[in-house]
Amino acid sequence: MAALEKELEVATEAGLELNRMLSEFLSAQHGSDTVMKSVEQLQKQLDSQQTTITTMTASLNAKNIEVLFYDNKQIT
């Protein structure tokens, strides 16, 4: 479970870093085809990161439910 939490943290940080880079990039340049292609590529990376985060969050939630269920079984 700790590994999933760490992977989720890394994926979140990567997504935030890409967002920061995109903002800086757009502030520095405007309108060219190169900028638009870069924006599209960064958006794809962000979308991929969001999918990873969503998947990992669901997996982490499932593991948490398993742990709670196991802990409750041990008590009874």
Image (cartoon, rainbow, N blue to C red):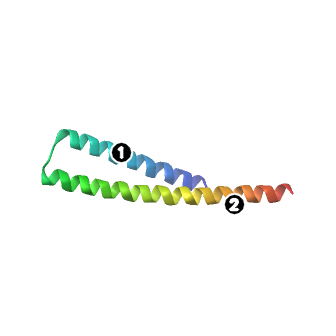
Q: Position of residue 49 (x, y in %)?
A: 40, 56
Please tell me in which quadrant of the rendered image residue 61 appears.
Answer: bottom right
Between 46 and 74, the residue placed more toward the observer is 46
Q: Provide the residue designation for mark 2.
A: 66
Say which amino acid is labelled 1.
Glu
* Residue at the far right in the pictured view: 76
Estimate the x, y position of residue 53 in percent, counting from the top left: 47, 55
Identify the element where label 1 is drawn: helix
Lower position in the chain sequence, tag 1 or tag 2: 1
75 horizontally vs 68: left or right: right
**Mark 1, residue position:** 17
Q: Secondary structure at mark 2?
A: helix
Q: Which mark is residue 72?
A: none
Residue 73, horizontal then vertical, whole percent: 81, 59
7 with respect to 73 (left or right): left
- Circle 1 packing at 10 Å, graded few (<14), some (14-19), many (20+), is few
Instruction: Give percent across and percent down for residue 74.
Output: 82, 57
Residue at (42, 55) in percent of width and height = 50
